[in-house]
Amino acid sequence: MLLTLQSLAELPAAAEAIIGHAGNNRIFLFYGDMGAGKTTLIKSLCSFLGTNDNVTSPTFAIVNEYQTTGDKIYHFDFYRLKNQTEALDMGYEEYFYAGAWCFIEWPEKIPDLLPQHYTRVSIAALGDGSRQINIENF
Ligand SMILES: Nc1ncnc2c1ncn2[C@@H]1O[C@H](COP(=O)(O)OP(=O)(O)OP(=O)(O)O)[C@@H](O)[C@H]1O
Ligand SMILES: [Mg+2]
């Protein structure tokens, strides 16, 4: 599924469409250059899922945890990871396979640890400030 967003105002509708398109998948990998809009989209997805928690980039913590009315959301940012062993050491498996929502920025840093099933969200910022978002299920 390909979405084109002209502005931030279109994010809530995009979040709803992305969650719908993902079907049973709960693990989402976010690809896109620095500043493409990964964290911004994750904020919108979290608010669609009903969390009142403050969604911020977990760059220093690696993972943030948010509570919705039903389930937990784990929000990862692996940008600062030096190697995949650091992901093993922080117990990534306990998060990935807990049945919770997982939103992962910079999955390129853990190429050997990716789950079998996930939804891939690729974001590109176009020259005019709009965003193109491609969503594929695996
Ligand atoms: N859909 C959008 N439309 C317009 N502006 C956007 C959109 N998404 C994000 N932005 C703007 O782009 C900037 C960077 O966004 P964001 O921090 O979400 O990027 P990121 O991909 O998470 O970057 P990083 O790789 O550094 O984590 C922010 O100023 C944000 O407001
Ligand atoms: Mg980010």
Image: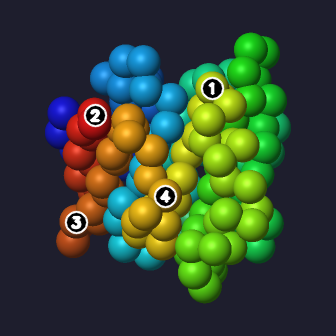
Image marks 4 and 1: residues in contact by CB distance under 8 Å = no
Choose mark 4 or mark 1, whichever is in front. Answer: 4
Residue hosting label 3: 126
Task: Give the quarter of the figure containing the N terminus.
Answer: top left
Residue hosting label 2: 137
Choose mark 4 or mark 2, whichever is in front. Answer: 4
Quote the CA–CA distance across marks 2 and 1. 17 Å
119 lies above or below 60 = above
x, y (%) of residue 38? 47, 57
In the picture, the disc for residue 99 is 1
Dot placed on the residue nearer the N-terminal end, 3 or 4: 4
Is 3 left, or right, of 21 in this rendering? left
Mark 4 nearby-residue class (10 Å; few <14, some 14–19, many ≥20)? some
Give, as a three-letter code, the residue at label 4.
Leu
Dot placed on the residue nearer the N-terminal end, 4 or 2: 4
Is 29 left, or right, of 4 in this rendering? right
Instruction: Kindly state the secondary structure of the residue where label 4 is placed.
Output: loop
Residue placed at 27% from the left, 62% from the top? 124
